[in-house]
Amino acid sequence: MTARAALTSPIALAAIALLVLNDHVLKAAMPGVLTGKLSDVAGMVFFPLVLAAALEWCVRSRHLVLGTAIATGVVFAAIKTIPLAADAYRIGLGALQWPFRAIKAGVLGDAMPGLAHVRLTIDPTDLIAVPAVFVAVWLVRERAGHRVIGTSRVSA
């Protein structure tokens, strides 16, 4: 199964739903350690699949999802532990969001918005979520019909 197909699996859809629900409802209603980590875990499952799905258009590799999972983990770790990386993330994500905010302002007749910085808390304890990137790898391989039995791999 490709990453594009894996994005429609129940696990990926649940991760997307959890990320949206947690970021837009639960964090405001119940701020704390649990809601802080839920988005991190959901993002670690979801983002490698999104990145691999985007790259599948131009890259053909059976290790693509593994590569995007590792890249996601490394970048997330940098963002959560290195202030310069955190600043780059906040500014970069704000720049990516700007066109949507500008369209909304144009439709509503509001003034053009400036570049917003995204809120981010540097928190090395968030690294507990990094192993969840391998759920994306498992999901693509599992859905492709490969089952791991003991140490040998067999096709279903």
Image: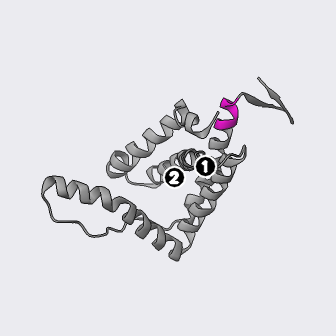
Q: Please tell me whether residue 115 belongs to the stretch shown in magenta.
A: no
| Residue segment shown in magenta | 139-144
Residue type at mark 1 is Cys
Q: For this view, does 154 lie left or right of residue 19?
A: right
Q: Quadrant of the N terminus?
A: top right
Measured along the vertical axis of the image, is residue 77 above or below residue 156?
below
Query: What is the total number of numbered labels drawn onto the structure image?
Result: 2
Secondary structure, mark 2, is helix
**Counting other residues with Cα less than 10 Å from the Cα at mark 1, is it few (<14), some (14-19), or many (20 or more)?**
few
Residue 55: x and y, percent? Answer: 58, 49
Q: Quadrant of the C terminus?
A: top right
Query: Which one is in front, 126 or 103?
Result: 103
Measured along the vertical axis of the image, is residue 144 above or below residue 85?
above
Which mark identifies residue 5? Answer: none
Query: Which one is in front, 73 or 80?
Result: 73
Residue drawn where x is 37% and y is 46% of the image = 26
Q: Residue beneath label 2, please?
A: 40
**Counting other residues with Cα less than 10 Å from the Cα at mark 2, is it few (<14), some (14-19), or many (20 or more)?**
some
**The furthest residue to the front:** 58
Circles 1 and 2, Cβ within 8 Å, touching? The answer is: no
**The furthest residue to the top:** 156
Residue type at mark 2 is Asp
Residue 103: x and y, percent? Answer: 24, 55
Query: Which one is in front, 75 or 26?
Result: 75
Which mark identifies residue 58? Answer: 1
Residue drawn where x is 53% and y is 45% of the image = 46
Residue 22: x and y, percent? Answer: 40, 46
Residue 32: x and y, percent? Answer: 42, 54
**The furthest residue to the left:** 109
Mark closer to the observer (1, 2)? 1
| Magenta stretch: dominant secondary structure | helix
